[in-house]
Amino acid sequence: MREILGRRRRLRLRLRRRGRPAQLDAVLTCATAWQWPVLPGVGPEAAGGRGDRGRGCACPDPECVVPGAHPFDPGLLAATTDERMVRWWWTNRPTAPIVLATGGRAPCALSLPAVAAARALAELDRMGTRLGPVVATPTRWSLLVAPYTLERLGELLHAQDWVPSSLRFHGEGGYLVLPPSEVGAGQVRWERAPAAGPRAGSNRGASVPVLGPAAPWLPDVGAVLDALVEASNGAPDGGSRLAY
């Protein structure tokens, strides 16, 4: 009987999801299952573009350096895990980018130019370092890490000889756009899909994409910082442009 009832519940869930935008499914997983505070981003301009620089931003600033990839209305402080609020936002704006408010109890992130990031990931893989989710846009990649304090980050950076401007930190008071958003630079995707932490009896080296409620596993910032600094130092023209 339990098995039959379980099948019925799963069928009802699939029917409710059928026809629902992928954006809403993704943001509900982030907010309600993973307890990551989110809010809608401003998004790219509706039409036109800027040639090889991609589309402009829907915000009033014609010189916006992160087109479509930032909060606007509401502001960052409105980020929440409340299901009703999240549903209301994305019912009214079904294609709005998903903005994660980083820090606190939420994931933090380190981002760097795409070319340097690909090199860093290859080196971390060679070293056998377990990575968490990696968010990619055409211009920058971001590695999600466990929450860190400004004091901890300061200690880690102080130990470095030099930290390039191309490497950026998304901690308390920061934000990051998550897949499957579209921003001015293009589509946001998972370069490394979120994976659950190890469970009893599981293969600790496994990296299986999570579709259920388990919160993604996140590495400590200290485990990846050295490789990212080294890769950023070798980024073409310093990778100093902020574009996302």
Image (spheres, helix red, strand yellow):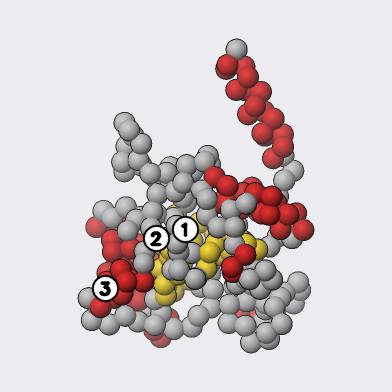
The amino acid sitting under disc 2 is: Pro
Mark 2 and mark 3 lie on one chain; the one further toward the N terminus is 2
Identify the element where label 3 is drawn: helix
- Examine the image and state in which quarter residue 76 appears: bottom right
The amino acid sitting under disc 3 is: Glu
Mark 3 and mark 1 lie on one chain; the one further toward the N terminus is 1
Q: Residues within 10 Å of mark 3 (few under 14, many from 20)?
A: few
Query: In the figure, is residue 210 to the left or right of 95?
Result: left
Labels 2 & 3 near each other (Cβ < 8 A): no
In-front residue for pair 194/51:
194
Query: Compared with residue 50, is residue 210 higher up or lower down, i.e. above or below?
Result: above
Identify the element where label 2 is drawn: loop
Query: Compared with residue 23, is residue 79 higher up or lower down, i.e. above or below?
Result: below
Q: Residues within 10 Å of mark 2 (few under 14, many from 20)?
A: many
Does residue 188 appear in this view? Answer: no
Q: CA distance from mark 3 to mark 1?
A: 21 Å
Query: Where residue 140 appears, x then y in whole percent?
Result: 48, 71
Give the residue at mark 3.
Answer: 155
Give the residue at mark 1.
Answer: 106
The amino acid sitting under disc 1 is: Ala
Q: Which mark is residue 205?
A: none
Identify the element where label 1 is drawn: loop
In-front residue for pair 101/168:
101
Q: Residues within 10 Å of mark 1 (few under 14, many from 20)?
A: many
- Examine the image and state in which quarter residue 123 appears: bottom left
Labels 1 & 2 near each other (Cβ < 8 A): yes
Query: Where residue 129 appears, x then y in whole percent?
Result: 28, 55
Q: Residue at x 32, y 37 (%)?
A: 203
Query: In the figure, is residue 167 to the left or right of 58?
Result: left
Query: Compared with residue 94, is residue 165 higher up or lower down, i.e. above or below?
Result: below
Query: Compared with residue 63, is residue 204 higher up or lower down, i.e. above or below?
Result: above
Q: Which mark is residue 147?
A: 2
